Image: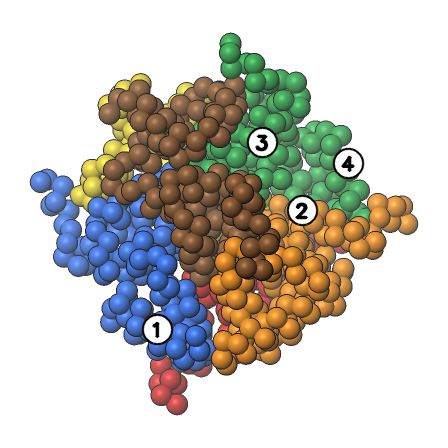
Chain colours: A blue, B yellow, C brown, D red, E green, F orange
Amino acid sequence: MSESEAYRRGLQRRDQVMGPAGGRRRRMMRALHPDLEEHLIAHAWGDVNARPGLDVKTREMLTVGILLALGRDREATTHLNGALNVGVTRDELVEVLLHCSVYAGFPAMVTGAHLLADILEERGELSLDDEEG
Amino acid sequence: MSESEAYRRGLQRRDQVMGPAGGRRRRMMRALHPDLEEHLIAHAWGDVNARPGLDVKTREMLTVGILLALGRDREATTHLNGALNVGVTRDELVEVLLHCSVYAGFPAMVTGAHLLADILEERGELSLDDEEG
Amino acid sequence: MSESEAYRRGLQRRDQVMGPAGGRRRRMMRALHPDLEEHLIAHAWGDVNARPGLDVKTREMLTVGILLALGRDREATTHLNGALNVGVTRDELVEVLLHCSVYAGFPAMVTGAHLLADILEERGELSLDDEEG
Amino acid sequence: MSESEAYRRGLQRRDQVMGPAGGRRRRMMRALHPDLEEHLIAHAWGDVNARPGLDVKTREMLTVGILLALGRDREATTHLNGALNVGVTRDELVEVLLHCSVYAGFPAMVTGAHLLADILEERGELSLDDEEG
Amino acid sequence: MSESEAYRRGLQRRDQVMGPAGGRRRRMMRALHPDLEEHLIAHAWGDVNARPGLDVKTREMLTVGILLALGRDREATTHLNGALNVGVTRDELVEVLLHCSVYAGFPAMVTGAHLLADILEERGELSLDDEEG
Amino acid sequence: MSESEAYRRGLQRRDQVMGPAGGRRRRMMRALHPDLEEHLIAHAWGDVNARPGLDVKTREMLTVGILLALGRDREATTHLNGALNVGVTRDELVEVLLHCSVYAGFPAMVTGAHLLADILEERGELSLDDEEG
């Protein structure tokens, strides 16, 4: 696969996962240095994430698990949103959080719960009143 | 120990350590999924943290050290407060920070110092004027 | 779910994933302290891993990704074997390794490749002659 | 080297790298406990960072790489500024970020890019209009 | 405290914790570069570990918790031995392991259990027959 | 740069850094899946490591610092050798180890010292008799 083919395929996958939210970040990277953005799109998204060997939902759950385990909260927020965008359900993400509590510790789960609750509130899919239900 | 016994014991320990501050977090988790909150209270707090084999002060110091080493700042803030709540002194927490500088690097100590200073200011137990003393 | 029910369910799941290999490890833990083994089986395996919300293959891929990201090589070996035991294919594990290279760095992928190659050789499913094919 | 000599040398190196920005942080640490500040200045800066065996630019690049790899964002911001202060160029920092993508994963690079872009904007050395250029 | 005083105090603390086992390691470091050994003894052991603010048993438990959380197995082995040398009991170390399962994940506990079981067997304080008891 | 150009450039850089030692590892990866080896050579080595923006010695020191900080001992051994292969001196590597003690903790330094001492002994450049000198 040529570089430009990888870039094109990466952009497509990224749009699918991130939605319009990824645009601002890409502009920031290009402003800093065009190679940062190209490297991210062509290699992370195009050469790896867009491979057919695993479906996109499994990849996003895997990504969320790794990012919470490593404590990379900013990126975890991005991919919790991405996971919801490609059809991972809220209940499946709760399972990923519970799974993280075992293999990376409860703080990974608790932090993930905070991030996910904030995202769902922003999307209008969670309110604290739910708990009375 | 039955699940409900572990939950009851966990809730009691958690209230002792976290004080009323833990309430908002528990509501958020229940809103996301009741199993998250129950898992946290029954297993993290009830089955482990409330065990008699180590006193609560030693446990909180251990928790703070681990969380700072792993860079889990949000949780570290929670447990620095928790440590103070159960009687760990400010000077003992300073020792934990110094200890972290050796085994996890100075950034763990410096971050911990920022978090602890913010907490003490909020509690009215530290002001920058102290330094003139 | 009562503790003993969680333990029973955990043991069943663990046998499914680990096979007979898990027995020696469980004896070691019981010798050290029975609570270590019970805590691992009832809570890690019974209360979380055996939950129906995610299928066992997805859970093992998630586990392998988290363990390689965190650099827990000994446990990663255990779960690479476990993943193969529950039907994750060699090619799917290669995808998990490639995915790790993006989200946790190439060293996580390279270490995972070494561990997986050793496991496959032991199982008689890989030989260095394969590469001439 | 006596303690006071290490402290004096550390203070000098720290001022060179951090500039006036380090002052507020030092006051906070002294308020918390004088030993925290002395330990940081004498041992981290004086006994190690100020050693002649590696030039200050290489040390700051190394520091930035390690901090981004470990996910210590707050400290990484401090040392991205420090690196610029001692003459590491924006393009060299971009290389460090790209290098991090390989050895610590793309999230370390992406987080570092966000932090660096914010710093350069604050210094008036980057605007999003650059990208149209 | 002068450097040589810190070194002297560090050596004394290190001998107390590590016993004769620390000697071979110190020779290796001196052979590589004398400053490595002096830095370790004077600053890690003398300036921090030997401080009176926390007792030596609490420090060793804290060290073990941090090292297992960070996955530094080689060093964890050293300090599990050190903890036993200064009077931390086997049951207290089991509590530290259980505590790690919550705040750093079960893999930290399981790895710690393997390391501790090996150490106790070497010391003649554990045999697999114990489990039949 | 086309994929094949990146691969060619990566192979050249890798041979320069790793020497003949890299061959066995590449065969293992190709046996597991050809894409693993191609991904590593083309993207890690060709697209990033071989970039002209930082000299090869600085890159290897940066790599060693990151790998020791993350606790990836197996890879750290490979790159300590690589650093020596491209002309980083033993004393410069000692400085990297001391630098790691500050930013990633003493265990990163101590582990790195063990790995480096083993490498130098294998190369016939260190013997424990050196210390008597």
Residue at figure coordinates x 20%, y 37% from the top left:
B34
- Outermost front residue: C133
Residue with the mark numbered 2: F110
Dot 2: element: helix
Q: Secondary structure at mark 1?
A: helix
Disc 3 from disc 1: Cα separation:
47 Å
Task: Identify the secondary structure beneath mark 4.
Answer: helix
The image shows a total of numbered marks equal to 4
Front-most of residues A107 and C63? C63
Q: Which residue is mark 1?
A: A9
Amino acid type of the residue tagged 1 in the rendering: Arg
Residue E93: percent from the left, percent from the top? 53, 26
Quick one: label 3, few (<14), some, or many (20+) residues within 10 Å? some
- Label at residue E115: 3
Q: Which one is nearer the viewer's eye here, A20 or A113?
A: A20
Is residue B125 something that shows in the picture?
Answer: no
In the displayed orientation, state which residue is furthest to the top.
E133
Q: Is residue E127 visible?
A: yes
Please state which amino acid type lies under the numbered disc 4: Gly
Circle 1/circle 2 CB separation < 8 Å: no
CA distance for labels 4 and 1: 58 Å
Same chain check for tags 3 and 1: no
Lateral position of residue C23 relative to residue D15, left or right: left
Provide the secondary structure element on which disc 3 rests: helix
